[in-house]
Every structure is written in C-alpha cells, then in structure tokens.
C-alpha cells in the first residue's frame, strides 16, 4: 500500500514531493518521513513543525523528549508562501489511534477495516480533503497546492467517498433526459403545493347546518305535495271540468275475471296529459306530474269518463278521480227542453250550444250507430248511413243531459223516451187507419209544422188524409202541397223557397207522403194523426189571427188568399 500512497501524494503534490516521516505520528509507530526533495531536503514550500496542544513549539518525536508535564507534540504542515504574505493552512484534526489499525481480537477476514485519516489507509488524509474542496481562488492563495487545471486524475485505488464529493456547481451530476419524448401520453399539469387545512369543529358545524337545511327543504316540498294530494289548501268552490271524448282511445288490457282467469278486454283509456292539463287550468290540482303519477298507480286512466264534471277545489286526488266517474254523481248536467217540431238539425245545434255533445259526433251517431230497437227495424225506416234516418223518433220533451256526454247515450235517451210514449194504443189506432208507424210519424210531423193551434191539429190531419185517400177529387191529384216540406228541404241547402225543387220531400212535385218525417212531433200531433177529424176539406190557408181557414174547393181557397184576411 505504501507505493500506492506515494503515487497518490506525488499526483497530488507533484513529482518532486517525498515523504520521509509520517505527518501524524501514532503511538508506538515510527514518524512519517518529512516531505523532501531529491537532494534530501524538505520539499519546496513546506516546513515541518511540532507544536503542543496549547500551540507552543515542541520537540520532534525523534529528537529530545519534551518536558515531563508536556504531551507529545503534533506535526503541523505549514505551507510556506514564496512571497512575504503567506497564509497559514488550518490545522488538520488528529485521527483516533484506535481507528488506524484493526482490532487484535477480530480475525483479519472478519473485521471491518478501520478508516483512519492518516497515511497508509485507503482514504486520503485531511489535507488531501482540504485540497479537493478548495475552489480555484483558494488554490491560488495557498502556495504549493496545485491549481484546478493541474489536479491529477483520480485513480480507482482511492475513490472519493460520495459523502465528501464536492458540492460545487461544476461537480453537479447532470443527465440529459427527454421526458416528453419518452412519455408522450402524459398530460402536462401544473403542480400546486397542497394546503393543509385545519377546520376543526367548524366542519362539523357546517355539516350539521347543511343537513338541517336539506331536511327543511325536503320537509317543505313534502308538505306542499301532501297538501295538494290531500286537498288541504283548497277552497270550497265548485268548478266544471270537461273531458272531451277525443282525449279517449280504446286499448286492450288484461284483467282477471270473477273466476280468476286472465282475459283481454277493451277499455276506454283517457290521455292523462290532457286530463292533468284540464285540472291544472281549472285550479283543481297544482302539480300535474304528481297527479299523473297518482293516476298511473291508481289506474285512473280507465276510471275517468268523458263529460263535464263538477269538482270542488278542496277535493283530494282520490276524490277528483272518483268525481269524474259515472258512479260519482258529480257529473255536471244541463236541462234542455226540446220543442215539438224541432228537426234533427235543430236538435244537434241545441246540443252543441249547451255543451252536451259535438255536432259531428252526434251526426255520426245518428247515421252509423245501429240502435237495437224493434220500431227502427220496421218497413219504411231509412237504412244506416243517413243522418236523418231517425227524424221523427227523437221525441221532443224536457231532458237532463250530462255535459260532454257520449253521443250514443244522448240518442238512446231520445229513443227510450219515444218507446215509452208510443203505446200499444197507438199501434192499434195506426192499424185501424191502415198506416204504419213510420207513415203516422210523417203525417204527425207535417201537422206539427203546419198547425197554428192545438184545436186545428185534427182538422189539418183530415185535409191530409182526404187528399191521400181521394187523390182524384178537387183537382189535387194526390199532391199534399204542404209548404213545410219545402222549408224542410231548403233548411239544409240554403236555397230559396220554390215549388220546383227536385226532392222526394217536395209535396208540390211528388204525390203522396214525403220520403220521411220532416220534424219530431209531440204527442198531440201524433194523436191527431191517429184520429183525424172527419171533414170534406181539401184546402186551408193562414189567416191574420195566426190560425188557418179551411175550404172544400179550390175556388173558395183562392178567394180567401186574394182577400185582405189572408195572413200567409
């Protein structure tokens, strides 16, 4: 190891440096040689002095012994500057003697070698460390220390410990590494220093307040919804709610019958959106979505029916649904008086004006619904497809209809009343005259439209039957010549009155009875048609008093028409 050490010092101090005695003598060890040149002198730039711990000069360990109270001196390397102002290097600390050699108790192969800081160890001494840690300016101020450019290269035999490597900027470890090229998929994001927050009990208080607020909001919403469902905040006020027929449609659904079997039935299903809109518009409900949810759960879409219903604003949802069913009794009704002699056109208009049914719905029911009544299957009743086929059978009377009622139900109410009013006695009287029910109704409808007073109904009936039964008398040729039949024709066409209109209802052009009743007669006219007066009258004309004058001949008739008594 000495050769390696000498090489190290030569590389550090120069080729002319020599070590003849140890710089740091150890107890019981020979002194390191002083650095000398080739001629045996001290190396240039260095002198070896020995001083005691208190800094006083001391004798060399190889020379005379010091005083008894003094301790062996320590060698100090004092570099001597070539100039007059020479700085003095700092004292190197003395390494521990125990660290310079291995412990004798341990085998050489098992002991960890000590790391002495003096010569002969595998590590440079303090002076070497001092020289390495000097920067360029310090090297220039200390004579004998090589400059940075003249620093010898390090050898693997004496590597510098990592902990003692220079921390100068020139010795920093730098590695060129392109992070973006190696990791192209990593998104750049500015890193911010996190903050350590200390909320303490404040977070608990805020959480408690948040829970309280949420609870209050949910409770408020729940109460508002509950008041609407239960009808707590409604006023005691009745309103009319109309569910038109066009918001309903037929739908097949599966249900269980009385025996528990699943069967498919056709139901009339309401559009819940339209129902909710109507109820919301009338102020019956406040939350349409909530009512629709309730209706779906309670199957209200198949329970409610078309019509106009009287509901109260303080009804709960269950009462609202029940109030729009036929069993509720809350259906809004209207009482209508159908005058005697009203035609189908006039009745349909009256129904539409009062909200009972729509015009088109009623006309469609009259033309295409096959009502199951025997008197409608008799001879002379027009076939399906003609809206006027039931003219004469809509018995005039006082009726109570539901608003928004079903048209078929409305027509049935008329027909039921007609069936009740037309008694068996009427059938017997019609048979005695040799007339059918249809013919009696045609005669009764003309009497209804022509009579100015009840007292003249049977007389008008006698004129009609005289002309029907004796078409060759008094020049009538079997023509009834009743103006009411012409008015019935032009009521739907808007034409002007003319006896030349080509229609089976024109009694001026076609002999005999018209094609059908021209109005819906009352009981008085029907009785007059069943029991006409016995007269020889073939003509009548309206006087100024509003009643008719009757005549046996045409000449009598013309004379009255040309007089100032004629009121026609």
Image (tube, grey):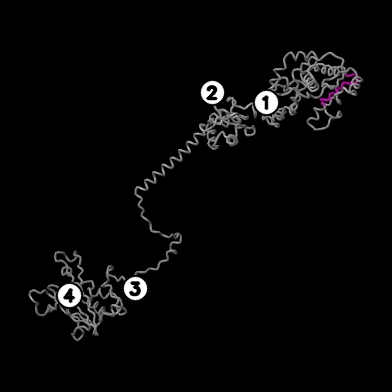
- Write down the residue under mark 1: 410
Mark nearer the N terminus (3 vs 1) = 3
- Write down the residue under mark 2: 259
Mark nearer the N terminus (3 vs 4) = 4
Q: Distance from label 2 to label 1 (Cα)?
A: 35 Å
Q: Secondary structure at mark 2?
A: loop
Mark nearer the N terminus (2 vs 3) = 3
Q: Which quadrant of the figure has residue 2?
A: bottom left
Mark nearer the N terminus (4 vs 2) = 4
Residue lying furthest bottom = 39
Q: Which quadrant of the figure has residue 371?
A: top right
Q: Secondary structure at mark 1?
A: helix
Q: Which residues are magenta?
A: 471-485
Instruction: Look at discs 2 and 3 and give the one toward the viewer.
Output: 3
Q: Nearer the viewer, residue 381 or 423?
A: 423
Q: Nearer the viewer, residue 109 or 185?
A: 185
Q: Is residue 136 left or right of residue 492?
A: left
- For image coordinates 43% across by 40% down, the residue present is 215
Q: In the rendered structure, are the residues bearing label 3 and label 4 in contact, judged by CB atoms less than 8 Å apart? A: no
């Amino acid at each position: 190891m000495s050769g390696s050490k000498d090489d190290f010092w030569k590389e550090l101090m120069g080729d002319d440096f020599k070590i003849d005695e140890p710089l740091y003598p150890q107890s019981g060890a020979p002194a390191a040689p002083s650095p000398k040149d080739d001629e045996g002198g001290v190396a240039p730039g260095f002198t070896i002095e020995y001083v005691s711990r208190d800094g006083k000069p001391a004798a060399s360990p190889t020379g005379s012994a010091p005083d008894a109270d003094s301790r062996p001196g320590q060698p100090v390397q004092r570099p001597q500057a070539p100039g007059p102002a020479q700085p003095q290097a700092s004292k190197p600390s003395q390494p521990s003697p125990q660290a310079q050699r291995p412990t004798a108790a341990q085998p050489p192969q098992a002991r960890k070698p000590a790391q002495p800081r003096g010569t002969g160890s595998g590590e440079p001494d303090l002076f070497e460390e001092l020289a390495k840690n000097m920067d360029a300016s310090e090297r220039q101020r200390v004579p004998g220390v090589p400059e940075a450019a003249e620093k010898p290269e390090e050898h693997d035999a004496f590597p510098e410990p990592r902990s003692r490597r220079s921390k100068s900027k020139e010795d920093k470890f730098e590695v060129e590494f392109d992070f973006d090229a190696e990791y192209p998929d990593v998104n750049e994001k500015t890193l911010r220093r996190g903050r350590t927050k200390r909320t303490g009990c404040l977070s608990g208080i805020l959480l408690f307040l948040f829970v309280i607020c949420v609870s209050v909001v949910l409770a408020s919403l729940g109460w508002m919804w509950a008041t609407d469902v239960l009808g707590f905040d409604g006023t005691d006020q009745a309103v009319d709610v109309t569910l038109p027929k066009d918001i309903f449609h037929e739908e097949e659904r599966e249900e269980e019958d009385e025996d528990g079997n699943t069967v498919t039935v056709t139901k009339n299903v309401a559009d819940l959106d339209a129902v909710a809109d109507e109820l919301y518009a009338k102020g019956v409900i406040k939350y349409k979505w909530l009512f629709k949810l309730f209706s779906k759960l309670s199957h209200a879409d198949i329970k409610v029916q078309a019509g106009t219903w009287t509901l109260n604003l303080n009804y709960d949802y269950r009462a609202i649904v029940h109030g729009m069913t036929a069993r509720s009794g809350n259906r809004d009704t209207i009482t209508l008086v159908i005058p005697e002699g009203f035609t189908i056109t006039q009745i349909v208009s009256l129904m539409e004006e009062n909200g009972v049914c729509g015009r088109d719905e009623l006309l469609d029911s009259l033309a295409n619904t096959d009502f199951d009544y025997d008197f409608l299957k008799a001879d002379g009743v027009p076939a399906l497809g003609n809206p006027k086929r039931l003219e004469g059978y809509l018995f005039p009377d006082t009726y109570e209809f539901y608003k928004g009622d079903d048209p078929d139900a409305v027509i049935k109410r008329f027909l039921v009343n007609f069936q009740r009013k037309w008694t068996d006695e009427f059938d017997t009287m019609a048979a005695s005259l040799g007339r059918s029910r249809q013919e009696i109704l045609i005669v009764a409808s003309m009497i209804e439209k022509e009579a100015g007073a009840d007292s003249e109904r049977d007389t008008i009936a006698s004129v009609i039957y005289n002309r029907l039964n004796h078409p060759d008398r008094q020049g009538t040729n079997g023509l009834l010549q009743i103006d009411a039949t012409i008015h019935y024709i032009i009521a739907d066409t808007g034409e002007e009155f003319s006896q030349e209109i080509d229609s089976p209802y024109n009694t001026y052009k076609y002999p005999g009875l018209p094609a059908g009743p021209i109005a819906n007669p009352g009981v008085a006219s029907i009785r007059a048609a069943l029991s006409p007066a016995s007269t020889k009258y073939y003509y009548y004309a309206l006087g100024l008093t509003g009643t008719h004058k009757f005549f046996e001949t045409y000449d009598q008739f013309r004379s009255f028409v040309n007089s100032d008594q004629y009121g026609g």
